[in-house]
């Protein structure tokens, strides 16, 4: 009897030991991980249709989480896009336009509330590892805007003396690498940067496993110039660009594994997306937005519609696909609702997509989304299945010779002279302008656009004489 009890006791202790290795964190507040790539095309992930780039970790993340097929970046360019996702505002509302560079003297205003600042109010540890691009002077650095620690670069990785157009067009200084607010290196090549960012991210998770944290991973890649470590060089059928995406996929896998190893997988919100579409003028060093039209620097679908995957096992059903429109401005209020954080005191434009993500609703959180570019020009509006474009000038590589091996091709400019309307659900490539067939849709969207113009303005259009009567909701 004694021996039987002893064996049972021993088995119990072994069982407890085994369980302790796999224990879930007792932490109730969800962690938040935002992985944000640079210039990645809609098609450049396996589950979003890539024919020649392997992304097993992102594909598995989509299988375990939720995939959004009509998600839009806040704008089709670097700094503005980052401002939108971190503040919940249309970038022009807060004065961030285009892509800030070494010569710019402005950046994100101290009065704005970032996602990091919002979560710090709840006691979250906050870290950013990668590209900031919201101002490089001390007052604008991430450590002044809610982040406890930072490792990375202050602006785009091509803003350095090795730019292919350095001299004739640009005069960039050295590219600094920061540790918090101290420059620790001057970059002359970048092949180890993705690995270093990943190592820092995993270390941050390990150090903060016992308290809630917000980890922001804005990769400088696959923005040109393309760099990849030796372990992924030559691995992709898609050439160097594919190698870079494969290394980013590996990085995602390392972060997900760290969460699992620390018992944090169930209670962590992990988001993967990109800042804008592919830089098409770089040819074989650019991504693909197919079957979408155009790319970075345009309001066409290929410029702002991005791959988006969110995984949160505690709250979100695995394997779901959502086709309703969502924009980057909705991320901050969505995270606020998931975590119980207070929204910024200042007006924001985003609305929570929590009910859409959890399946409680099938509707987009917003009636319409507005596509601005340059300083403050409204190019288009997404309303239901419709996308309307106002007359404007845009760039295209159509009919042009693309660049190759890191050298850019030259865009040509096109003037859109009349309003154009597309059904972007059934005409995903935006080939059939149906404005003349749906005048009631055009009038409704013009009314919605006029309402937003009264809030944010529009350098393209004078308000005088525009229609202000609501023609009613369309179905």
Image: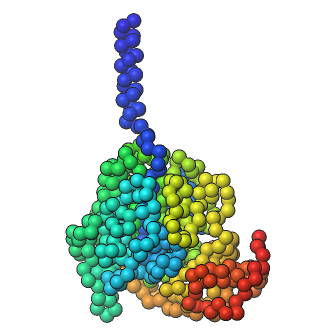
Residue sitting at x 51%, y 59%: 342
> Where is residue 246 shown, x and y percent of the image?
40, 62
> Where is residue 95 shown, x and y percent of the image?
47, 80
Q: Residue furthest top?
A: 1
> Where is residue 206 shown, x and y percent of the image?
33, 49
Instruction: Quadrant for residue 225, please give it.
Output: bottom left
> Where is residue 37 shown, x and y percent of the image?
43, 67
In the image: residue 295, left or right of residue 422: left
Of residues 34 and 396, the one nearer the viewer is: 34
* 469, above or below 257, in the image: below
Q: Is residue 466 visible?
A: yes
* Picture colour scheme: rainbow
Query: How many labels sit on residues?
Result: 0
* 153, above or below 352, in the image: below
Of residues 457 and 379, the one nearer the viewer is: 457
Residue sitting at x 54%, y 70%: 348
Q: Is residue 75 visible?
A: no
In the image: residue 83, left or right of residue 201: right
Instruction: Quadrant for residue 354, please give it.
Output: bottom right
- Quadrant where the N terminus sits is top left
Instruction: Quadrant for residue 325, please give it.
Output: bottom right
Residue sitting at x 47%, y 89%: 411
């Amino acid at each position: 009897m004694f021996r039987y009890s002893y064996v049972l006791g021993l088995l119990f202790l072994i069982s407890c030991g085994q369980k302790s290795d796999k224990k879930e964190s007792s932490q109730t507040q969800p962690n938040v991980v935002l992985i944000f790539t640079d210039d990645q095309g809609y098609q450049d992930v396996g589950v979003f249709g890539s024919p020649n780039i392997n992304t097993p970790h992102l594909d598995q993340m989509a299988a375990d989480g939720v995939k959004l097929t009509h998600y839009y970046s806040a704008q089709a360019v670097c700094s503005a896009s980052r401002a939108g996702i971190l503040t919940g505002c249309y970038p022009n509302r807060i004065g961030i336009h285009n892509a800030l560079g070494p010569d710019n003297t402005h950046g994100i205003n101290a009065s704005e509330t970032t996602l990091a600042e919002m979560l710090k109010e709840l006691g979250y540890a906050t870290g950013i590892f990668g590209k900031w691009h919201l101002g490089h002077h001390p007052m604008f650095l991430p450590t002044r805007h809610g982040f406890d620690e930072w490792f990375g670069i202050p602006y785009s990785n091509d803003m350095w003396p090795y730019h292919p157009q350095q001299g004739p067009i640009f005069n960039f200084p050295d590219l600094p690498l920061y540790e918090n607010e101290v420059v620790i290196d001057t970059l002359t090549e970048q092949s180890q940067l993705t690995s270093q960012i990943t190592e820092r991210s995993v270390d941050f998770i390990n150090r903060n496993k016992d308290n809630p944290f917000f980890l922001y991973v804005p990769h400088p890649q696959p923005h040109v110039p393309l760099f990849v470590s030796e372990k992924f060089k030559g691995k992709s059928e898609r050439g160097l660009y594919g190698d870079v995406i494969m290394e980013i996929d590996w990085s995602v896998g390392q972060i997900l594994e760290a969460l699992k190893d620390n018992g944090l997988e169930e209670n962590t919100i992990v988001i993967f997306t990109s800042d804008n579409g592919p830089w098409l003028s770089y040819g074989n060093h650019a991504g693909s937005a197919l079957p979408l039209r155009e790319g970075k620097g345009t309001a066409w679908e290929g410029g702002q519609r991005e791959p988006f995957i969110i995984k949160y096992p505690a709250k979100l059903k695995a394997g779901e696909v959502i086709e309703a429109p969502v924009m980057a401005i909705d991320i901050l209020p969505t995270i606020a609702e998931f975590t119980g954080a207070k929204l910024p005191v200042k007006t924001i434009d985003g609305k929570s997509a929590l009910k859409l993500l959890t399946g409680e609703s099938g509707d987009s959180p917003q009636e319409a989304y507005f596509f601005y570019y340059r300083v403050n020009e409204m190019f288009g509006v997404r309303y239901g299945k419709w996308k309307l474009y106002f007359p404007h000038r845009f760039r295209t590589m159509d009919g042009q010779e693309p660049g190759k091996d890191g050298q850019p091709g030259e865009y040509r400019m096109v003037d859109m002279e009349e309003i154009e309307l597309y059904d972007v659900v059934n005409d995903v490539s935006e080939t059939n302008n149906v404005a003349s067939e749906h005048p009631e849709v055009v009038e409704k969207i013009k009314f919605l656009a006029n309402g937003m113009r009264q809030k944010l303005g529009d350098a393209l259009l004078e308000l005088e004489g525009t229609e202000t009567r609501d023609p009613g909701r369309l179905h």
